Amino acid sequence: MAAFKKIAIFGVGLIGGSFALALKKSGAVGEVLGVGRRRETLLRAAELGIIDSHTEDVAQAVAGADLVLIAAPVAQTSALLQAIAPHLQADTVVTDAGSTKTDVVAAARAALGSKIHQFVPGHPIAGREQNGPEAALFDLYVGKKIILTALPENPAAAVDRVTDAWQRCGALIHHLTAEEHDAVFAAVSHLPHVLAYALVADIAARPDAARLFQYAASGFRDFTRIAGSSPEMWRDIALANRSALLGELDAYMAQLSQIRALLDQGDGPGLEKTFASAQAARQAWIAAIEAAEQARSFEQGGD
Amino acid sequence: MAAFKKIAIFGVGLIGGSFALALKKSGAVGEVLGVGRRRETLLRAAELGIIDSHTEDVAQAVAGADLVLIAAPVAQTSALLQAIAPHLQADTVVTDAGSTKTDVVAAARAALGSKIHQFVPGHPIAGREQNGPEAALFDLYVGKKIILTALPENPAAAVDRVTDAWQRCGALIHHLTAEEHDAVFAAVSHLPHVLAYALVADIAARPDAARLFQYAASGFRDFTRIAGSSPEMWRDIALANRSALLGELDAYMAQLSQIRALLDQGDGPGLEKTFASAQAARQAWIAAIEAAEQARSFEQGGD
């Protein structure tokens, strides 16, 4: 018998679709049911073999589900949890894939009330440029981190069920509190997105923008790649993680002001020291990533 | 007969070495002579077929050369021009490959005096992560931009000689004044490098840096790629282009302060508008790059 009799997925795009494909491939799931606002997306997901069936009826969607994954745009999470709450059976576990966690936890507490122990918040650190069911890949999560920000109310069995599903997708489970999660991602993800948007917006607004872009090269291209991301999604993330992101912006502007002062004073050794500390930290980070990748491929090869 | 009887190259690493390889492959040059401070680098360049001969004697290096390329680290440009000046024959043209131009022009005026008309400043917009003669590629410059910041004193024949050499490498010639060049590259290259260094330095200095780096993903990796660049080189570029870069830092910090205010006020539409203007500008830029690449490959195919 399959480990999961029925999984309901709200939002069958890149994130939800890849989760479904991975679990189906692993043979771990009896039925995958898709829920979404756009009928054509659900039909496409069914065509692609991502889901077995679909519905717009929330009660029907969650009835008898072992696991519910909310992978719709984060702005919908609160409304979806409210819609799910009255129909949520005692043996169902709900998780999500949102990029921020303290706001999701607050929304879940408000929506689920005494059923909050059934909600295990999560954030898969994986993505692609493309979106939608066509972009879904069965191996999107292989070797990728999934951060669970389990609640004090969660029984171990609920966390285990979510862990089991993601591990069957090939993912590596990490645990943080929601506050730790949001502080970390404000620094290493949300801030860089804002910085990249700011640079391109700054240049685009100049009278000589065309000439500036004409001479922008590969360094600029990589630096600004994340400024090609969805403005709606990043508006929502920025607002959801506002206080941590404000703190990061302030720390970054203080760092920039220091560099500006060094430059203004013509302090070559000071500039070089700052640049060298960054270069060394980045090289060490890249080396650690490569070592982890090698260790993983060695493990897999040894199976 | 070859278009160039003798070319002398000061600095036979990635930039100078690729220039030499491209010209040799095109059959346009009789002799390529390498000059450098490190004997092992010159020997390696000779082994790799980048240069035909080498010397540490500047007089011998420039004697009878049609063209001299200075492709050593920018901090050496002034000293090299001073060493070259007394030996510079009337029929030799000198060019360089430095990333900043107003400082190079000032150094050249000081070093060359009445021979300044023989110096045509240049900046190839091409690079790789690797350095040294081993990194040199005969096709590094194919389809890449070379910016010449010709001086009022340059006779057309001198500019033509430098243009001819770079075109034989497959490069596209662009003309700017030195001031225009430095303003453009402060915005699209020097500023992003400083911003990337600042982010990594900021994070590396935190007590929880290890955890932050642990969760940094591909967006962070691309954004900070240029923070892996040489601290010495970027110290020199920042100082050489100090006033333009200070202006860019100020404009950028003003843009960041605006975004910070929108975030602080919870102004979703304002944030989305800024992010969307950046996304649209970047998408248009990428589309223009791709169209230019297609047009170029069509032209080449039609030859």
Image: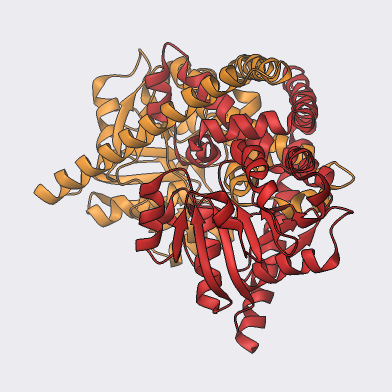
Chain colours: A red, B orange
- Residue A247, position in %: x, y? 80, 28
Q: Quadrant of residue B90?
A: top left
Residue at the spot x=56%, y=71% of the render? A23
- Between B276 and B107, the residue placed more toward the observer is B276
Residue at the spot x=51%, y=40% of the render? A225
Is residue B210 visible in the rendered structure shown here? yes
- Residue B278, position in %: x, y? 49, 26
- Quarter containing the C terminus of chain A: bottom right
- Residue B238, position in %: x, y? 64, 27
Q: Residue furthest bottom?
A: A303
- Quarter containing the N terminus of chain A: bottom right
Q: Is residue B205 left or right of residue A192?
A: right
Is residue B12 visible in the rendered structure shown here? no
Residue at the spot x=42%, y=57% of the render? B53
- A86 over A228 or under it: above or below: below
Residue at the spot x=44%, y=47% of the render? B16
- A177 over A79 or under it: above or below: below
- Residue B32, position in %: x, y? 36, 52
- A191 over B6 or under it: above or below: above
